[in-house]
Amino acid sequence: QVQVVESGGGLVQAGDSLRLSCVASGLPFSSYAMGWFRQTPGKEREFVTAISRYGGSTSYADSAKGRFAISRDNAKNTVYLQMNSLEPEDTAIYYCAASRRVIPHSDSASRDKNYDYWGQGTQVTVSS
């Protein structure tokens, strides 16, 4: 049984940093590209970033470039999202997802339908 579990969310102030973690079990982790998405009430789920199976390739939404960094540790079946200089606009539920098809630098990375497994999400709230 595949499980994807995010952690590390919380309430922070604008300008602070936060690191999210995502552990995926029940699948050959290094065979999956991983992505982070976020969603706020009333809006569609939004792509944030993705990383290739061995971490050699990454891609970011414009809103994340220069502030967020994705990384992975295949020995721990874990992907991370380091978020710096957080802004109130970053407030959202952050979801981790796994995909066998996504190529980070292609259009496929930003389409949530291309991801096979999803976590339940972790809330990030940034106060001004």
Image (cartoon, grey):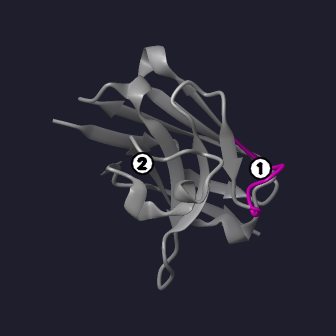
Nearer to me, 94 or 128:
94
For residue 104, the mark is none
Q: Quadrant of residue 86?
A: bottom right
Is residue 124 at least partly visible in the picture? no
Outermost residue to the left: 1
How many marks are shown on the rendered structure? 2
From which residue to which does the magenta span run? 62-69
For residue 16, the mark is 1
Left or right of 26? Residue 124 is right
State which tag comes first along the sequence, 2 or 1.
Answer: 1
Residue 92's x, y, as percent?
A: 55, 66
CB contact under 8 Å: marks 2 and 1: no
| Gap in angstroms between the C-alphas marked 2 and 1 | 25 Å
Q: Nearer the viewer, mark 2 or mark 1?
A: 2
Q: Residues within 10 Å of mark 2 (few under 14, many from 20)?
A: many
- Majority secondary structure in the magenta region: loop
Query: Residue placed at 70% from the left, 71% from the top?
Result: 89
Query: Residue placed at 66% from the left, 48% from the top?
Result: 105
Q: Residues within 10 Å of mark 1 (few under 14, many from 20)?
A: some
Residue 41's x, y, as percent?
A: 47, 80
Assess whether residue 128 is covered by the magenta stretch.
no
Query: Residue placed at 42% from the left, 48% from the top?
Result: 97
Residue 29's x, y, as percent?
A: 38, 27
Per the image, the residue denoted by label 2 is 97
Q: For mark 1, give the secondary structure.
A: loop
Type of amino acid under label 1: Asp
In the rendered image, the quadrant that contains the C terminus is bottom right
In the rendered image, the quadrant that contains the N terminus is top left
Is residue 83 at least partly visible in the picture? yes
Q: Is residue 40 above or below residue 76?
A: below
Type of amino acid under label 2: Ala
